Amino acid sequence: MVHISIQHIIGTVALIGLAISLALAYQIVVGYVEENVIRTQLSQTAEYVSMSISHIINLMDFTYGMFKEYVTVSKSLNLPSDLSGKAYIIRLVNESGILYVRVEIPGRSSLYAKSSIPVNPASNISIVTDENFTPNDSTIEPKEYVYGGNPNVVVWCEIRKGVLYIGLGLRRLSGE
């Protein structure tokens, strides 16, 4: 008859517990590092979109009066297809007069980055989130938010009756 001592059982259980603890600690550290990498990528993407919007706003301010009203200026965005293998959403937000770009991972409310859109406080700027808004450029389809990685994403700007409208959208390809 085989005789197993209690010390062997306790030692085996302790080794199994140690192995599980190490695996969990490894997962926690890897998750933390991955989240920091994604947060950095979200921040860089938000800053890129913010600066693109700032450029077209400055262009519209500089040329105001040279264009007739309802001229739409747009810029195609060159966005990464994903951020560390995760899909992401870009939206424009006006929070108490502060305009910013918010880039987030869907389903992970704590994983996002914001970048303010530098504008003159005296400017009359409105963010368009209404998908029924019709810009003068019929190839632009306004969106409340866009998924990153879509090759047809644009930021656009248009002046109507002294109000500068900015928004995100998708450029329709000819024939659509």
Image (tube, helix red, strand yellow):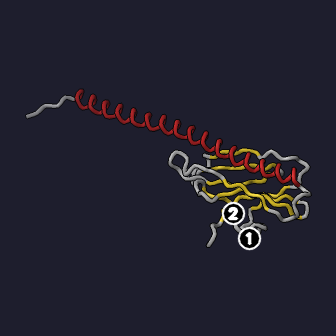
Q: Is residue 5 left or right of residue 125?
A: left
Q: Nearer the viewer, residue 137 or 97?
A: 137
Count of marks placed on residues: 2
Q: Residue at x 80, y 44 (%)?
A: 118
Residue 149 location, x and y as percent? 58, 54
| Image-quadrant location for residue 37 | top right
Identify residue type, mark 2.
Lys
Cα–Cα gap, marks 2 and 1? 9 Å
Quarter of image, res 139: bottom right
The answer to which of 151 and 98 lies nearer the viewer is: 151
Apparent side of residue 120 relative to residue 99 in the rendered image (left or right): right
Is tag 2's residue or tag 1's residue first in the polypeptide sequence?
1
- Residue at 79% x, 62% y is 72
Label at residue 132 = 1
- Residue drawn at x 59%, y 57% as measured from the top left: 150
The image shows residue 136 at horizontal and vertical percentages of 78, 68
Image location (x, y in percent) of residue 40 = 61, 39
Closest to the observer, 63 or 89 = 63
Mark 2: few/some/many CA within 10 Å (<14, 14-19, 20+): many
**Residue 97's spot in the image, x, y percent?**
84, 51
Amino acid type, residue under disc 1 in the picture? Asn
Residue wearing tag 2: 143
